[in-house]
Image (spheres, rainbow, N blue to C red):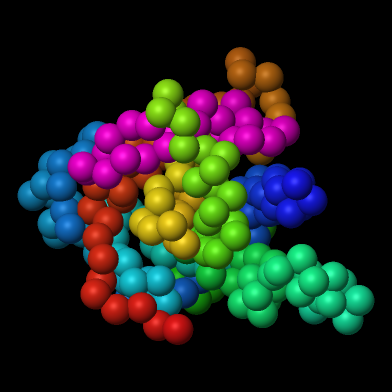
Amino acid sequence: MKTKRLLAATAVVLFASAVISGSLRCETPGGAQASAGGSRNESASWPTYRAERYGFEFRYPPRFMVTKHHDEGAPLKAEARAAFSRDGWTEEEIQEYEHPFKHDIVLVERKLFGNVLPAEVPVGDTFAITVQPHTGRKAKFDIQEFSKPSLQVSIGGRSVTKLPGYPGPYGDSVFCYFLPLSDRLVLEFVAPKFRSGSATREPANRGQPTGYDAVIEQIIATLKSSGSRAQ
């Protein structure tokens, strides 16, 4: 129970930092099926991102570029690390807790930055789609908490959890999907619903819809195993 409360609280904090504040730095990016807003032929020509660490890849619309979140993590104190170890956390899980943004995959629209080269993307508030791999106990937590049949939808032949919002204080202002790839790897997709400066604004004042749910579903429809996983 203690671990579940800790993971739930951590998820809310990570979401507020990653999706609402949008701190980014850019990185050059590395099975296609029909999806909402895109055809099989269309997505076949899209760029491919390969997550070698986790053994999967996906295609994404060329109007986006792939970036990474700044890793603002800090080492835990010795007492805290010892407490996590006593609670059954592996060293990899502790490191992921210390550096929560390290392996995020973040997609931002090129038009937001004009002709600025990817390496020059500034830090600041940015509308983005974040793909966060969850492993180990985080993946187990996702599967236990978000696998209700009433929340399942089929996208590209995969069973995906589509929540009505994010399970936290910004819930109805974001899109949120969970895609289990195994019992130890779950991908969380989150993105803002509106083009506004604040996710806490009233619906009438939140700006134009982003349409990022359609993009997320296009990405999920093209996702497949890359045949290898770096350890």
Residue range (magenta): 152-174
210 w.r.t. 16: above or below: above
Q: Residue furthest left?
A: 41
* Residue 119 on image: x %, y %: 50, 76
Q: Is residue 68 visible?
A: yes
Q: Is residue 161 magenta?
A: yes
> What is the quadrant of residue 195 in the picture?
top right
Q: Is residue 162 magenta?
A: yes
Q: Is residue 146 left or right of residue 22?
A: left
User: Toward which corner of the image does residue 162 lie, by quadrant?
Assistant: top left
The residue under the point 21% across, 42% down is: 157
Which residue lies at the image location 68% right of the left edge and 19% below the top edge? 202
- Counting from the top left corner in percent of width and height, residue 101 is at 62, 66
Indicate the quadrant containing the C terminus: top left, top right, bottom left or bottom right: bottom left
Q: Is residue 175 left or right of residue 24?
A: left
Between residues 114 and 6, which one lies in front from this camera angle?
A: 6
Q: Is 112 left or right of 166, judged from the image as shown? A: left
Front in this rendered view, residue 8 or 165: 8
Front position in the image: 182 or 131 = 182
